[in-house]
Amino acid sequence: MPTRSVSTPAFGQADLLNCEREQLHLAGSIQPHGALLLLSEPGYTVVQCSQNAAAFMGIAGSLIGRQIDDIPGDLAERIQPHFSDSLHEICRGVRCHIGPGGRPFDCLIHRPLGGGLIIELEGAGPSVELSTTLEKSVQAIMAAAGLRALSDETARIFRTLTGYDRVMVYRFDDEGHGEVLSEAKEAALEPLLGNRYPASDIPQIARRLYERNRIRVLYDVKYRPAPLIPALSPITGEQLEMSLCFLRSISPIHVQYLKNMGVRGTLVVSLMVNGKLWGLVSCHHYAPRFIHFEERAVCELLAEAVATRIAALESFAQARAEFSVRRLEQRMIQSISREGDWRSALFDNSTALLEPVGATGAALLFEGEVRTVGDVPSTAALRDIGRWLDRQQPGLTATAAFGRDAPDFASLTSIASGLLAVPISTMPGEYLVWLRPERVRTVTWGGNPNEPHLMGDDPLTLSPRRSFAQWHQLVEGTSDPWGPADHAAGRLIGDTVTDVVLQFRSVRSLIAEDQLNQVRRQIQQSANPVIITDPDGIILQMNSAFDALLPPHTRRPSSMGDLRTLLAGPDDAIEALRNLVKSGRGWRGEVMLDGRGGQPTPLLVRADPVFAQRDRSLGFVLMFTDLTERQAAEAARRRFQEGVIEQHRPMSGRLDSKADLVFRNLLGVMVENAQLAALEIADGVDPAEMPHMLEAVRASVTRTAEMLGCLIWHSSKGEDG
Ligand code: BLA
């Protein structure tokens, strides 16, 4: 592909590399089957005209500088009533008579950008019998039940009306390429029906022009342009802006193109559907041909009717799709209330999802699951497609050559050459995807599109496409293209499912919220102190059992950091808690909390990180056990053990050695028994109760020892006595 020149070529100076920007509206000349005058305003004096103007009008001498009133005939009188009209977008046509003989002319007036009033004159044409011509044609247009029938009817009507040798309805696709959709022609002519022509045949700048100026006539490709005199408009000092001039000279490149085609005269009417250039009615004649103002006006009106009908047919298809999507929506809503899920409604009837977009397979990628209907590739491939879609522009994705656009998927060509996808939520990887199979077909181009033009030195001999011999292209790896109606249906289903998903998730959120509240309440009421934090250590919940450990009027901690400031040590435990969030690893140990009454409370801490799937951290759970009682119990147990024997020594001192030995042995057994009981008590009972119970055991041991002492003392005395 040669690099395009960045210049903006003047009219007639373009070559095949920069013709996209040829300044068509500054043509500087006209086709000489008419004449052009530029009048100043106010004053209405001729300041610029086509070189042929005086001769064409049958007036002697120069026209420049003449007041409109000075032109013999009724021109001034006929156009004056329209001076107050806007005339910026639509030309006004009037019949007038000019010159000594009062020759009749059709006169078109409009105001160009930059000011002044342009008058274009052409020989007066016959009146058209409007009512019959228009009425019958419009009725036929309105009766067309489908696009194909409408297009055929349009070609027929225009051929009858205009008498051109060949009339084609030419439609643009999304990429700007054109296709001859219908054709009405002289029998002997070679058919062009079905031929495709590359987008480059009609430059963008020309397309934009044709959106404003809806009908163009090229009278004879062999015309000699009549230049404007002077070359620049005295009103603006620049070239005259000729977008709406029906006499405007045609680009030499296009004239050459037509010559190559063997065409002599053309009439082209724009078909504007929904504000866009949808296509053209393109008429060819093999001899010079002209159609008059009134006939052109009828053509323009009919084109308007055809375009309106196209819009209606397209929206009819859309309305039908809308209807089936509404039904689908109803079923999804019902399915939510019946089964708690909407997905089955999409899949329980295979046509409901496939038919509106004309697909052969579809897949739903939602919450990591893949559901399918019809012909689809493997689940793994569909997941890959989901990831590929995540990388595309947001919104609808459509391609009829998926394997070409995304070579990683070339192996899916047979079932997935066509892909249409819409997101169904704002989450990545959640899509509805439709597929179409490959359709190998032959496209017939009007000439080889790969060699659209041939280069030469002289712009006038540069030849856009010298040969129009049919060129057949075997197109592989593509599906039937997704049309605007498919896009609309896809979008509609996507929007509907998005709404349903949102509703579904809202309901779930409500249920989850309720469950969460219940769980929160349970934690709140639990007797065990608990703190729950997020992954950054921000406290999400701290229950009342923990709260009760804090001294009154302490500011409640809102983060793990705050919590640490409430600890009195030990340092290594505080350090371990500091590292908890960073390391994400669990920890257990003991800390001292600045507690009630200024007394530090010993706490056993179990801190555990919590993970969702794929190591995503949810946060931490910190469980606390108040060790105050346990430690008191432990101390009591130790006290008990150490105290019990020593306590009874003095008594045994009063015994003789033999009795003392007996006492010791017996007391040993009793103490051992009591110690065992104490151990069991320490392990089994509530630590709060333990000191008290140990005290009871200790009291009982003391009593036992005393009694034992008495008994032994008594018996040893008895022996002695
Ligand atoms: C204009 N080219 C056009 C027009 C058509 C075509 C219909 C509009 C003419 C009008 O509205 O009056 C092409 N005509 C076709 C095709 C068929 C047909 C495809 O009948 C098929 C049956 N043209 C080229 C290349 C260039 C080019 C390569 O092929 C430029 C590099 C230029 N085409 C070109 C220009 C115009 C044009 C500049 C504007 C003509 C004008 O309005 O002045």
Image: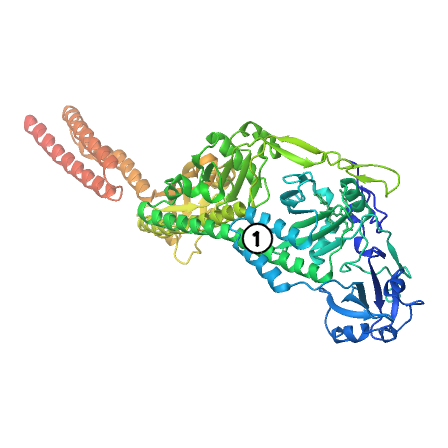
The N terminus sits in image quarter: top right
Name the residue that disc number 1 marks.
310
Q: Secondary structure at mark 1?
A: helix
Q: Residue at x 73, y 36 (%)?
A: 468
Percent from the top left, x then y, of residue 410?
A: 58, 29
Mark 1 Cα-neighbour bin, 10 Å: few <14, some 14–19, many ≥20 = many
- Residue 32 visible here: yes
In the image, taking residue 502 as reference, residue 103 lies left or right, namely right
Q: How many marks?
A: 1
Q: Residue at x 52, y 37 (%)?
A: 386
The C terminus sits in image quarter: top left
Check mark 1 vs ligand 1: CB closer than 8 Å? yes or no: no
Quadrant in the picture for residue 293: bottom right
Percent from the top left, x then y, of residue 387?
A: 54, 36
Q: Residue at x 51, y 51 (%)?
A: 145
Q: Nearer the viewer, residue 476 or 159?
A: 159
Q: Residue at x 79, y 38 (%)?
A: 3
Percent from the top left, x then y, of residue 658?
A: 15, 23
In the image, taking residue 15 as reference, residue 300 lies left or right, namely left
Q: Nearer the viewer, residue 582 or 215?
A: 215
In the image, taking residue 438 as reference, residue 15 lies left or right, namely right
Inspect the image, locate mark 1, and give the three-letter code of the amino acid beneath it.
Ile
Q: Say if 446 sits above or below 594 in the image.
A: above
Percent from the top left, x then y, of residue 440?
A: 57, 30
